[in-house]
Image (tube, grey):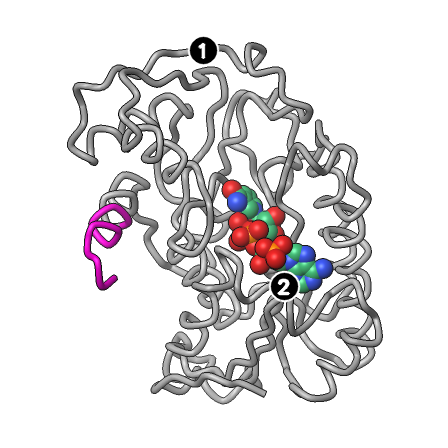
Amino acid sequence: MSTASGPASPAESLPRGHVGLAIPRRALVTGAAGMLGSDVVPALAGAGFQVVPRAREDLDVTDRAAVGRAFREAVPDVVVNCAAYTKVDDCETDPRAHAVNAAAVEILAEECLARSIQLVHVSTDFVFDGAKGSPYTEQDETAPLSAYGRTKREGEEAALRAPDGLVVRSSWLFGRSGWNFVEAILRQVESGRAQLSVVHDQRGRPTATPDLAEAIVALILTRGSGVYHFANRGEASWLEFAEAIVALAGRAEIPVRPIDSATLARPAVRPAYSVLDTGRYEAKTGKPIRPWRDALAEYLAARARPEA
Ligand SMILES: NC(=O)c1ccc[n+]([C@@H]2O[C@H](COP(=O)([O-])OP(=O)(O)OC[C@H]3O[C@@H](n4cnc5c(N)ncnc54)[C@H](OP(=O)(O)O)[C@@H]3O)[C@@H](O)[C@H]2O)c1
């Protein structure tokens, strides 16, 4: 069993008045090799947790017996579920989407319930239909437009049945350990494309996975439960996001042409406006959220360093 532990005790990170309460010390992370999972593991370790990371090869969360074994081996007091089926278009036809995003969360929630363990689950802005036109709060009705969104909503419901179930919704993720929009744009730039075409009619909040990972830890340490939204500060269309990537990559001369989502005719419908309101997170943790442009600049700088 591989474990990672960091220097500080979790209690040292607690706000005044909370030290001494029983707080989680051992964390089982599922989907630990994914884009987010790869940042959640060091974030938990850095806050003093003993971390038991389980990549898909080590733990298939749809396998009830394997999940039971993992809980018995890891003896966690918090489980952070970063496993998911994230190919949004494939979710329309692939039954594995429901198995991983919904049924497996039910399995995790049942195990957590049986052992009084907190379950932390990650969800998405795609649970909303995008018709609101102003930032979505945790109280807003969900109305997913896609199979991905529907399976993720079902996963949320399961997670909230676990003790102190914590659902953290986020959006438009980019991180060093996974394929993402930033890499897709850079690949086109680096392949010598004279111009790019990017959709202009979907708006959201781009979010760096290290920032989301730290936010998840902050919510665990401040004993958050229920639903919270976290995303980097500021909103953008995919077009604006692409323009920022191209500019920060030093290739502002490459024009980025706006296209309609309808032009792409993708199998899954995306919300036109899925900006998340993060006020509840900020009030709970007292932590400021940095702008997505700063997080993007840091991502690109790290990417440019060969050793990073
Ligand atoms: N990416 C986004 O823009 C975005 C936006 C909002 C919310 N989210 C949510 O954020 C969370 C993390 O997403 P991510 O971007 O880090 O996705 P990711 O890179 O695809 O990571 C998901 C991980 O889960 C693993 N996995 C798939 N099926 C599994 C199974 N049956 N058992 C165990 N592990 C399994 C995947 O392994 P394989 O790679 O081998 O399949 C992958 O390592 C998800 O809950 C996602 O819904 C993502």
Q: Secondary structure at mark 1?
A: strand
Q: Residue furthest front?
A: 191
Q: Is residue 74 above or below residue 13?
A: below
Asked if the magenta segment contains residue 274, the reply would be no
Mark 1 and mark 2 lie on one chain; the one further toward the N terminus is 2
Some atom of ligand 1 lies within 8 Å of the CB belonging to the residue at label 2: yes
Residue 258 visible in the snapshot: yes
Disc sitting over residue 93 in the figure? none
Q: Residue at x 40, y 74 (%)?
A: 15
Q: Amino acid at mark 1?
A: Ile
Out of 70 and 15, give the one closest to the viewer: 70
Q: Residue at x 34, y 87 (%)?
A: 7
User: Dot 1 corresponds to which residue?
Assistant: 259
Residue 132 sits in quarter: top right
**Residue at (79% x, 79% y) in the render:** 68
The alpha-carbon separation of the residues under discs 1 and 2 comes to 35 Å
Q: Is residue 273 left or right of residue 109?
A: left
Task: Indicate the position of residue 183 as horizontal and vertical percent values.
Answer: 38, 40
Name the amino acid, label 2: Asn
Is 194 or 273 nearer to us in this picture? 194
- Residue receiving disc 2: 81
From this view, report whether residue 224 is shown above or below residue 25.
Answer: above
Residue 282, position as x, y percentages in the image? 42, 52
Which part of the image, by quadrant, shows the C terminus? bottom left
Q: Is residue 37 left or right of residue 308?
A: right
Question: Is 56 left, or right, of 159 in this rendering?
Answer: left
Q: Is residue 170 visible?
A: no
Q: Position of residue 6 (x, y in %)?
A: 38, 84
Q: Position of residue 4 (x, y in %)?
A: 46, 83
Q: Residue at x 78, y 57 (%)?
A: 158
Q: Main secondary structure of the magenta part?
A: helix
Q: Which residues are magenta?
A: 299-308
